[in-house]
Image: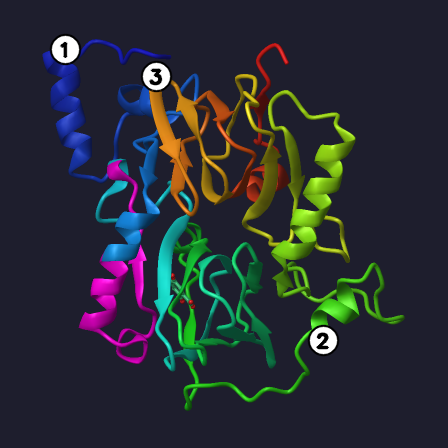
Amino acid sequence: MEQAPIETPERRAFYNRIDKQNMTALWTVMGDLITPEPKSPCVPALWRFDEIHAAMIEAGKLITAKEAERRVLVLENPGLRGQSKITTSLYAGVQLVMPHEVAPAHRHSQSALRFVLEGQGAHTSVDGERTRMSPGDFIITPIMTWHDHGNETDQPIFWLDGLDIPLIQFLDASFVERLDRDEQPIAKPAGDSSARYGANLLPIDYHGRGATSPIFNYPYARTREALHQLATAGNHDPCHGIKMRYTNPVTGDHAMPTMGTFIQLLPKGFSTSRYRATDATVFAVAEGRGRTRVGDQTLAWGPKDIFVVPSWHPIVHEAAEESVLFSFSDRPVQEKIGVWREDRGNA
Ligand code: GTQ
């Protein structure tokens, strides 16, 4: 039913009476609840890195990472202001750690991902292991694992944070704990999880632990090499170019239970076929320049820019240069409950 039945004085009086008893007539709201297509206040938007960078340097002078706990500027969807959401279900922010700062250890039920934008050699520690961060690295903080960030280099580091905060908020399942010291003890050598789980090998009696990949860092150097080789081989998908998803090597599923993470290469001059899917998606530009048409809007992007495409909005990417886009969405959740849908147009 798309249009609510007309309101008569008798009906209106009835609605008012039941309203006092915390009841509502479904037929007055049904059309807004069960829509023929996804309908959302989430809108397409783009944040230019030079603007984020300038604001973050100012933030760097206003507050320390320690005082802020996390010095992050939240990227708020223009259609969802005041809610700390970039899409209806996901949060994104850009975090800055200045030289010789520590963002103190905590753990929470929200899953977090990092995609490094600028800076080299700072580190994040997850579950007793420290990993160095380089641009393009995709780093995971699984549910309830201790994590702290530090920067012993002489340059600031900036990365994109993606968290499932709105989803966990929706479920009323948020917990956080803070450690009694700034940095957690380091119990494992650097590279341990990568050697143990990320070399197409698994420890003989390992059968997985939790829903998240045991690999903390998916380094860009390896990802980029794979994309390069695949692009050289050809066979580009008309809707995606060369597009890969990050996986949990134990299960083959997405690397994180609530957030799907993807990397794609678009050759210079490549224009994708019209595509839409039900997972609103956040993109970060790892390399290159181009534009993305979303409905009748055009988002022009360059390196480190971040943009968001709402659910079911048709998109076309046009790469002016060879480009690499990182992206994330709530696709794993939608797949698990069986609602994820895509429309490849005629491709
Ligand atoms: O680095 O742990 O952007 O807890 C928001 C919440 C980052 C983090 C955010 C967080 C973190």
**Magenta run includes residue 59:** yes
Question: Amino acid under label 3?
Answer: Asp
Image coords of residue 141 (percent x, y)? 54, 65
Question: Amino acid under label 2?
Answer: Asp
Residue identifier under label 1: 8
How packed mark 3 is, by other alpha carbons closer than 10 Å (few <14, some 14-19, many 20 or more), is few
- Mark 2 / mark 3, whichever is N-terminal: 2
- Residue pictured at 50% horizontal, 29% vertical: 278
The one of 338 and 294 positioned closer to us in this rendering:
294
Image coords of residue 159 (percent x, y)? 43, 59
Give the number of the disc on residue 296. Answer: 3
Image check: 181 left or right of 256? left
**Res. 84 in view:** no
Q: Tell me the CA gap for discs 1 and 3.
A: 40 Å
- The quarter in which the C terminus is drawn is top right
Magenta region, residue range: 55-78
Callout 2: SS? helix
**Magenta run includes residue 236:** no
Residue 168 in the image: above or below residue 316 = below
How packed mark 1 is, by other alpha carbons closer than 10 Å (few <14, some 14-19, many 20 or more), is few
Give the number of the disc on residue 192. Answer: 2
- Residue pictured at 29% horizontal, 52% vertical: 52
Q: Which image quadrant shows ligand 1?
A: bottom left
Question: Amino acid under label 1?
Answer: Thr
Residue 295 in the image: above or below residue 71 = above
How packed mark 2 is, by other alpha carbons closer than 10 Å (few <14, some 14-19, many 20 or more), is some
